[in-house]
Image: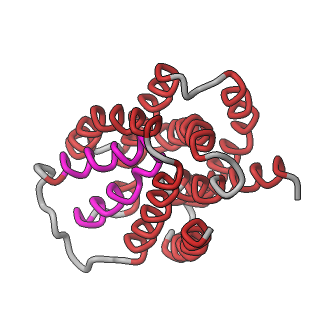
Amino acid sequence: MSETATVIAIILLSGLIQGITGFGFGLFSMGALVLIMPVRDATVIIAILSLASATLNLWSTRKNIPWRDALPVTAAAVPTTIIGVWLLRSTPTEVLKAGIAVMILVGCAVTFWQPKRQLINKPLPAAVGTGALAGLFGGALNMGGPPIVLYTLLRGWDKTEAKCVMSLFFFVTGMLRVAMHGITGNLTAALAWRSLLLLVPALAATFAGVRIFRRLSTRAFRYSAAGLLVVLALRILLG
């Protein structure tokens, strides 16, 4: 399979995961793409595609967003997302790859954990800490998902409320990431063009995932995706 076909396949599966679960585009796509292209190139491309996917997710959940819960965690991520993008320019490649692998494993652990009761009853101060941490990893690695998913589990939300909060979070931080990549010079004309060519498969797969989300439980799918992510993380660490 050519590199182009491989990239398209990765983007299709990433979009499907994002559409069904509300997160996972960055986790899966970054874990796979860094095996075939430089980390910084993959980060910029996925930042653009993640924003497009998050926009579609946000549109599909716009009528059900719990603003009181979503705003604190999203606002806290704004400054740390900026810091994360700046760190991408100065952090060694091997450190970035290790960070990707670790965040994948954390994300998988979070996916498999299902608390039996609500452990956080109020948004503050947990929302601020969660948003700040997710913004940092999201800005540097496009991997802000695990802290946010963990937070939604601890709040005891159902899948619809959790997806609404995550959709708003990823939309706002995604807008900021793409803008910062442009300001810092990470976003080149070649990467922008390549990202635009991948928008169609990314959005098509996300749309399909959104349709599937309405019809089935996400538990089995998350477990399958998590198993594949573990394999990717081990491949990155061992490679």
Q: Quadrant of residue 201?
A: top right
Q: Which residues are magenta?
A: 127-156
Quarter of the figure with the N terminus? bottom right
Horizontal relation, residue 166 to residue 214: left or right: left
Horizontal relation, residue 158 to residue 124: left or right: right
Q: Tell me the residue at 43%/61% (across/down).
A: 103
Q: Main secondary structure of the magenta part?
A: helix
Percent coordinates x, y for residue 128 in the rendering = 18, 46
Q: Nearer the viewer, residue 31 or 165?
A: 31
Q: Is residue 129 magenta?
A: yes
Q: Tell me the residue at 73%/33% (across/down).
A: 194
Q: Tell me the residue at 62%/49% (across/down).
A: 206
Vertical position of residue 157 compared to residue 187: above or below: below
Horizontal relation, residue 105 to residue 127: left or right: right
Q: Quadrant of residue 148?
A: bottom left
Percent coordinates x, y for residue 156 in the rendering = 25, 66
Q: Is residue 212 magenta?
A: no
Percent coordinates x, y for residue 98 in the rendering = 47, 60
Q: Nearer the viewer, residue 63 or 86?
A: 86
Percent coordinates x, y for residue 238 in the rendering = 58, 72
